[in-house]
Image (tube, helix red, strand yellow):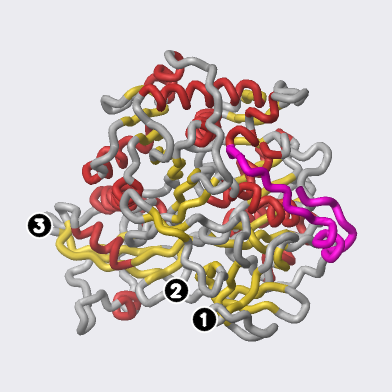
């Protein structure tokens, strides 16, 4: 969509939107790659399994597998507009399910793999999901979360090595019984396709609904930020959970739109595994959240490593120190893509055609207009702070907000769609989102917000806990202070509490350390006095090494 240009001005001048009246996201990125003379036997997906075995899947194979998914769901009564929740790690199963749901006109509800029972329960109930497809390791959390999901009728489990499915149907067994012939539904650009929620586990967030045309709307910023993507020989990989909006819309689906292979690796990799994966499969384009990019760069500085063509990140801003380190270690500038769930990818930078300014993710992508507006929707002068907003009728904009089996159109302010992020545009066209300071009681852990009171509440539900307090330590880790019930606390209870938090809340909220205390200090309003907890003297009766948490 975006032509290679020698300057940002040339990229904008030569850009034209080419939007069809009818468009199905899955047909575009999969079926189209096997039709009208296209070589459907090109590699679409490279999967490295945990034991090191590598499997390659062509676009034709993904087409047949996703057809089976669509037929299996259709046979179970799932149809146009029905919500299908999916929680699968990077895998061929995830690829087939995502494509199958989209091509049949159902609405995909991706569920990040880090979420526990409580946030999963809210998303299943609020979305009104009629079917859910999960990995077997997600099944215990799903069983505790589905009680309030009154519309949920079908549960399919991707069970590895014939493991337990908890009484649900095994995904592969169902697919083997389904036909691999299916005609993708002809959908409009604004037909609902994707219902996304924030990746964090806090509160009861509102779902954001996107149409099939959203993929086309995200492409200009993605192509700009990934170095005029694609280039000859590109192979893409992302460290992000495929069940997140940026991973799907800024990495995986844009790659298949252009016929570029995507690499998938085992779930839960660390930086060392990331470097090895990139080297083994010749990854030339990588997109990853800032936290993962920092870990990758820190490790690459100490050993031999691959040299990708482009490293992309976002939507959180990159620290100036990380930018410098990436340039020193990899010899290239880290590019950013910025946007939000409401407006999609709207801003990007590209070192080949524009100056990289620390603190700014770049300029509005060609074909897209981003301005700072006041509460009345009036465009502000350059430099004046306001809310960053997307110009009317932009293809990447969401259709609206979800609310219990229905949705209402996106709330426009004088025709502009706000991103809910404050900031400004400077005289040179650079966008400057304001750093979002966490609200009281909320801390950031690995780039994800954590509401300490919610984690405390989850801990108090444990039968052996009388009271609990949470605090963030100086090193950025979470620590839980526990008043144990009769019998006291020990290392085994501490480990049980960590598993309890992971099960009920999510992986980002698991306390790295647990300390048992006699009482939890409280403020006048009844909340935990975090300052007093952190001011407690360091214990001198250190436990034995085998009992340390």
Query: Could you tell me which residue is drawn at 33 percent across and 37 percent down?
Result: 130
Residue closest to the eye, 93 or 206: 206
Instruction: Evaluate whether residue 6 shows in this view.
Output: yes
Query: Could you tell me which residue is drawn at 55 percent across and 78 percent down?
Result: 377
Judged by depth in the image, the label closer to the viewer, 2 or 3, is: 2
Judged by depth in the image, the label closer to the viewer, 1 or 2, is: 1
Callout 3 secondary element:
loop
Give the residues in magenta. 1-25
* Label placed on residue 486: 3
Query: Could you tell me which residue is drawn at 33 percent across and 49 percent down?
Result: 405
In this rendering, is residue 443 above or below 124? below
Q: Residues within 10 Å of mark 1 (few under 14, many from 20)?
A: few
Read off the residue under disc 2: 438
> In the image, 36: left or right of 114?
right
Callout 1 secondary element:
loop
Which one is earlier in the sequence, the residue at label 1 or at label 2? Answer: 1
Read off the residue under disc 1: 376
Is 263 covered by the magenta stretch? no
């Amino acid at each position: 969509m975006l032509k290679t240009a020698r300057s940002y001005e040339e990229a904008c001048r030569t850009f034209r939107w080419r939007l069809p009246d009818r468009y199905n996201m899955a047909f575009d990125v999969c079926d189209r790659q096997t039709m009208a003379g296209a070589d459907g036997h090109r590699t679409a997906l490279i999967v490295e399994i945990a034991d090191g075995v590598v499997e390659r899947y062509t676009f034709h194979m993904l087409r047949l597998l996703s057809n089976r998914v669509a037929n299996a769901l259709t046979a179970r009564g799932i149809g146009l507009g029905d919500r299908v929740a999916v929680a699968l790690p990077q895998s061929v199963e995830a690829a087939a399910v995502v494509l199958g749901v989209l091509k049949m006109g159902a609405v995909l509800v991706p569920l990040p793999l880090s979420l526990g029972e409580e946030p999963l329960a809210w998303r299943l109930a609020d979305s009104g999901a009629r079917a859910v497809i999960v990995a077997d390791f997600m099944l215990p959390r799903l069983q505790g979360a589905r009680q309030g999901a009154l519309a949920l009728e079908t549960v399919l489990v991707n069970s590895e090595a014939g493991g337990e499915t908890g009484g649900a149907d095994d995904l592969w067994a169902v697919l083997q019984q389904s036909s691999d012939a299916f005609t993708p539904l002809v959908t409009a650009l604004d037909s609902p396709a994707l219902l996304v929620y924030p990746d964090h586990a806090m509160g009861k967030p509102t779902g954001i609904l996107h149409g099939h045309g959203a993929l086309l709307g995200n492409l200009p910023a993605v192509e700009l930020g990934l170095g005029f993507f694609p280039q000859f020989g590109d192979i893409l990989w992302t460290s992000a959970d495929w069940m997140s909006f940026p991973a799907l819309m800024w990495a995986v689906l844009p790659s298949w739109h252009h016929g570029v292979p995507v690499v998938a690796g085992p779930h839960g990799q660390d930086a060392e595994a990331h470097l090895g994966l990139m080297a083994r499969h010749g990854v030339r384009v990588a997109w990853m959240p800032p936290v993962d990019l920092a870990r990758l760069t820190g490790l690459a500085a100490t050993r031999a490593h691959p040299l990708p063509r482009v490293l992309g990140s976002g939507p959180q801003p990159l620290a100036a120190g990380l930018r410098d380190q990436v340039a020193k270690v990899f010899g290239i500038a880290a590019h950013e893509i910025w946007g939000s769930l409401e407006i999609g990818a709207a801003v990007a930078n590209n070192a080949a055609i524009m100056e990289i300014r620390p603190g700014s993710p770049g300029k509005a992508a060609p074909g897209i207009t981003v301005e700072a507006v006041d509460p009345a929707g009036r465009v502000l002068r350059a430099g004046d702070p306001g809310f960053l907003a997307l110009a009317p009728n932009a293809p990447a904009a969401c259709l609206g907000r979800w609310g219990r089996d229905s949705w209402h159109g996106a709330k426009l302010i004088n025709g502009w769609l706000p991103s809910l992020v404050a900031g400004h545009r400077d005289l040179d066209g650079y966008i400057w989102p304001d750093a979002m300071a966490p609200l009281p009681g909320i801390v950031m852990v690995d780039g994800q917000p954590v509401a300490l009171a919610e984690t405390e509440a989850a801990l108090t539900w444990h039968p052996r806990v009388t009271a609990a307090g949470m605090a963030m330590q100086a090193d950025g880790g979470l620590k839980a202070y526990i008043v144990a019930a009769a019998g006291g606390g020990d290392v085994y209870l501490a480990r049980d509490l960590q598993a309890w938090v992971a099960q009920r809340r999510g992986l980002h909220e698991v306390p790295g350390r647990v300390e048992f205390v006699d009482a939890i200090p409280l403020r006048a309003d009844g909340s935990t006095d975090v300052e007093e907890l952190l001011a407690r003297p360091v214990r001198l009766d250190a436990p034995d090494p085998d009992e340390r948490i």
